[in-house]
Amino acid sequence: FQTRSDRLTLANFDERLRELEDIRYECEQSRTLSRDIYATETYKIASEEHSITIKLFYQYLYEENQFYNNISRYLSSKIPEIEQRLENDDLIPLFDYDLIKNCSKKKVH
């Protein structure tokens, strides 16, 4: 035996259940959207960091290459001076020929 107030309570229960289901669905959608936004931002930041790292690494390699090229040019420019000293120095030990030969090889390359 259901009275009229029981049926009203049941209708209110069904309505409240639908409201709660709607709220649950909205929360789930919001959570999914937040997770997607977080993942997108995380990947974006990681990509930017990777790009910056690559650019800095290329810059580092370029600077290092320039540094060694400058040293090589400087030393190559000094080889004639060293050869001249070796040829003119009377006190050079017997290995002077090897040094002159070695300098000449470096100059060719």
Image (cartoon, rainbow, N blue to C red):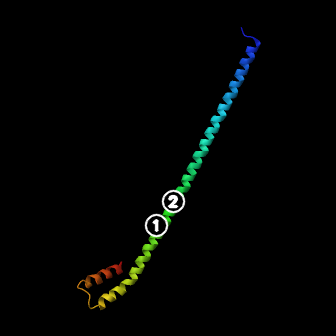
Looking at marks 1 and 2 on the same chain, the residue that comes earlier in the sequence is marked by: 2
> Can you say which quadrant of the picture contains the C terminus?
bottom left
* Quadrant of image for the N terminus: top right
Mark 1, other Cα within 10 Å: few <14 / some 14–19 / many ≥20: few
Residue lying at 51% horizontally and 59% vertically, measured from the top left: 53
Which residue sits at x=75%, y=11%? Answer: 3
85 up-or-down from 6: above or below: below
Label 2 Cα crowd, 10 Å radius (few <14 / some 14-19 / many 20+): few
- Residue 31: mark in rendering: none
Query: What is the secondary structure assignment of the residue under circle 1?
Result: helix
| Type of the residue with mark 1 | Leu
* Residue displayed at 29% across by 82% down: 99
Disc 2 marks which amino acid? Thr
Q: Which residue is mark 2?
A: 53
SS at mark 2? helix
x and y percentages locating residue 62 in the rendered image: 48, 68
Which residue appears at 73% of the width and 21% of the height?
12
Q: Position of residue 4 (x, y in %)?
A: 76, 13
Quote the CA–CA distance across marks 1 and 2. 12 Å
Residue reaching furthest to the top: 1
- Extreme residue in the right direction: 4
Tell me the quarter of the picture where residue 47 sits: bottom right
Percent of width and height locating residue 96: 26, 85
Please give the count of numbered marks on the rendered protein.
2
**Do residues under tags 1 and 2 come within 8 Å of each other at their CB atoms?**
no
In the figure, residue 32 lies in which quadrant? top right
Residue corresponding to mark 1: 61
Side (left or right) of 106 relative to 61: left
x and y, in percent, of residue 19 in the image: 70, 28
Left-right relation of 62 to 41: left
Compared with residue 5, is residue 73 higher up or lower down, i.e. above or below?
Answer: below
Q: Is residue 62 above or below residue 73?
A: above
